[in-house]
Image: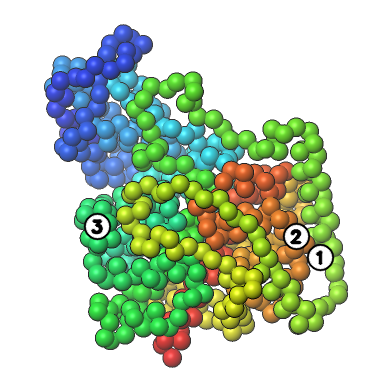
Amino acid sequence: MASNPAAGFTCHANGESTPGRGSSSGRSRRYRCESESDVGPTDKSLARLCSRDEEERAAALEELSRGVLLCLELDRSGSAQLSKQTLLLLLRLSRSCPLQGVRERATELLRTAEEQGVEVPRALASGPSSFIPAKEILKQGLDQDILIESFLSLGRVDHITMVMALHPAYLSCFLRTQHALLEMDGPLPRHWRHYIAVMAAARHQCSYQVQQHSAGFLEAGGEESWLSGLEHAPTKLRSLQTLNKLLAHRPWLITQQHIQELVCPGAEPRWSFAELIHAVVLMAHAHSLCSFVWGCSINPEPDHIGGYTFQLPSPSHLPRCPHSPAHEDGRQELVDGVMEVEVLMQRMVALQQQEEECTQEEMVTRFERERSESIPTAVVRGAPPDLVLRLVEEPEFRYEDFAPKGEQSPPTMRAQDYSWEDHGFSLVNRLLPDMGQLLDEKFQVVSNLTYNRMAMHDGVDTHTLRKALWNYIHCLYGIRYDDYDYGSVNVLLERSLKVFVKTMACHPEQTTARIYHAFWRHFRHSEKVHANLIVMEARLQAALLYTLRAITHYMR
């Protein structure tokens, strides 16, 4: 089939070239135009590049190459130039496409453009995370089957996917669930889904997700004006704001009254139960994903604001790989890290062999002790960027401890009275078919995920440690398991780990490199990512349980 050599990219009028810094070839650098006509590659051409048919992919790649080279020829004569969006597409493909041929061709085209005097973008980050060295994340290479599948299905492999690929079994469940939430048939229009995710991510100042879902919102046909402020969105979407802020920061305050205001026959506008469940799962999903983004310090995508620059590199601005303080502070830190692992191993074995049983009263006392323990998280970030702030109502509403010392706390939620397995799962599955199953599979996979190793040790049963992490997060959210001894939490989770977990679960925007590197100093980064996944999913389930309980009470 004949194809237009300029399809899949954009040339536009060059006009007068602006003098720039001299290139190595001595020519002045031509600046890309940023006019309103600066349109990017078409959806159709990008879809062909992600085709499962190798021949069609090869043809699309050749088409893209011919078009770029043709545009460079026109640019040389002063009549046209490559658009910013095309250059950013090439940058993204050169950095993250798991198909080696596409990645290498995009790199080659950028190099050719630069040699022709075009000012090309450069990625600001050296990898997907500023906490984890890129070589650790991409140890298995970009051409993993799960990353190739992600590219062919979604058209890109983002930084979240790359980091989660350290745990492929979990990533597979995560991608299925997220795809169903955002793309599959459901009660909410596709652009509404992305806008709800934008509203949710903004609560945690997560510009990464705000940018990602803003792009999805526009691609789905959403009105750009909605992104300039909540007041431009429909009243029905704005009516979610109270539920959104409670879900993000204090879900235990959600009551059936909040549900009634949205679904009762007199509500204006009124949400159906199916629509509301869809919106609740979307918000909780985005909130918990903010914990992962901040907890792993996910860098902006190379084609997002903050992820690229058109400036020439200088030695003082070269990206640096993060290093653990344990590697920088000398031999003593290394020895201390090894000792921490050995002590933790001994405690895990002791707990597994423990036969002493506590009374129910003692179990409750230990739970209350953990719940009310003071864990400082006093870091304050600067004001969030404008693109986030304009999408938040009551930005001063933040997390507060479920049970501050000396204050009356809300009643504890006993897992025996309302649990995911016995109550939440069936309610979600009934109102949003298959979503309960997808969420349950994700919870099961992250809870059971193990490689039977810990730091430098193999053949380790980590069940008690994983369970302590999960139950500690639920404890922070006021959820108690009658049959669990919360004394295990204090034995297995040292204070620096508790600081990280509480920060990430309750106010993730305050996570710092110091907090990340302070815990599990001798563990692999992949093990810390595993801990992040447990925190993310335990937080998601806790927030869902409070909302689903309120819906159940209203429906009675």
Question: Which quadrant of the figure has residue 430?
Answer: bottom left
Q: Residue furthest top?
A: 26
> Is the image coloured rainbow, by chain, by secondary structure, or in one colour?
rainbow
Type of residue at label 2?
Answer: Leu
Q: Secondary structure at mark 3?
A: helix
The residue at which mark 2 appears reads as 492
How crowded is the residue under tag 1: few (<14 C-alpha within 10 Å), some, or many (20+)? some
- The CA span between labels 2 and 3 is 47 Å
Q: Residue furthest front?
A: 406
Type of residue at label 1?
Answer: Leu
Seen in the picture, residue 308 relative to 338 is either above or below; the reply is: above
Front residue (pair 327, 405): 405
- The CA span between labels 3 and 1 is 54 Å
Q: Secondary structure at mark 2?
A: helix
Image quadrant holding the C terminus, namely bottom left
x then y, percent, for residue 290: 47, 55
Seen in the picture, residue 187 relative to 99 is either above or below; the reply is: below
The residue at which mark 1 appears reads as 351
Residues at circles 1 and 2 in contact by the CB criterion of under 8 Å: yes
